[in-house]
Amino acid sequence: MPEHPFHPDDFPLNEDVVLNPTQVFYLKGCVHFKTTAKIIDLSGRVRQPFSGDFSHAFLDEAEQVAGKLDESPAYEIKSSGNMMRTLKTITKAGSGDKVCDLNMTFVSFGSSVVRFPPGSKHCRHEVELCPVGGSGRDDSKHEAFVRHSIPYFWDMTRGRVGILYKCLNQKRVEVGRVAGYGFDKDVVLVINGNEIDDVVAISTCIVLLNGRDAMDA
């Protein structure tokens, strides 16, 4: 399996920049799902402050607000079959317009890829996720991708909280964070929408959450 040419060790963490989320999403049923899932936009609706990390109060309110908006998600995910490893398609809720395809793969089958339609406002090329290297058991939870020539890293080696980094001026800055909720089937994602496209963050997050070592059942 190929390793990505970028490694987080090449980009020291810029500790002067803290995550200031502009968007909040509730990814309902997006972990180890086989058929459908929903992505609910909570931006501007969660009153609890986000102070660098998720508090129980923030997560609880996010879940409550998502429950009220369950019938009007921003995006929906549909599958081409009944297995986790079939092609997943993210569409705009309501219109059904395709936003991107997720081609998630087993660790032995190469890299997972997110493909966007021609002319997409979210990304002008496909996004390939690759492990950052090493031989530890957490490699599959720490991967890199490139969007518009800029490297990003998803680090999900810290248990229930994952961090999305963007490389700016040869340093890493945090632009997103995700935490599990709802019996490990749901997650809450916060991002700085000025630094990362929402669909790119959501799609790559879902790929990582479903993991290279997650087997179909």
Image (cartoon, rainbow, N blue to C red):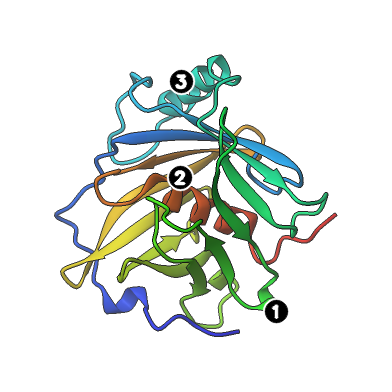
* Tag in front: 3 or 1: 1
Q: Residue at x 51, y 69 (%)?
A: 129
Left or right: residue 44 versus residue 61 is left
Task: Tell me where residue 144 sits by quadrant.
Answer: bottom left
Under circle 2, the secondary element is: strand
The location of residue 159, given as percent across then percent down, is 53, 53
Q: Is disc 2 in contact with disc 3, using a CB cutoff of under 8 Å?
A: no
For residue 20, say whether it is visible.
yes
Q: Looking at the image, is mark 1 or mark 2 earlier in the sequence? A: 1
Where is mark 3, residue-wise? 61
Q: Looking at the image, is mark 2 or mark 3 earlier in the sequence? A: 3
**Measured along the vertical axis of the image, is residue 83 above or below residue 104?**
above
Which dot marks residue 158? none
The location of residue 54, given as percent across then percent down, is 40, 36
Q: CA distance from mark 1 to mark 2?
A: 26 Å
Q: Assess disc 1: are there few (<14), some (14-19) or many (≥20) residues with their C-alpha within 10 Å of its C-alpha.
A: few
Image quarter where the N terminus lies is bottom right
Where is mark 1, residue-wise? 108
Where is mark 2, residue-wise? 178
The location of residue 188, given as percent across then percent down, is 49, 37
Q: Which residue type carries mark 3? A: Glu
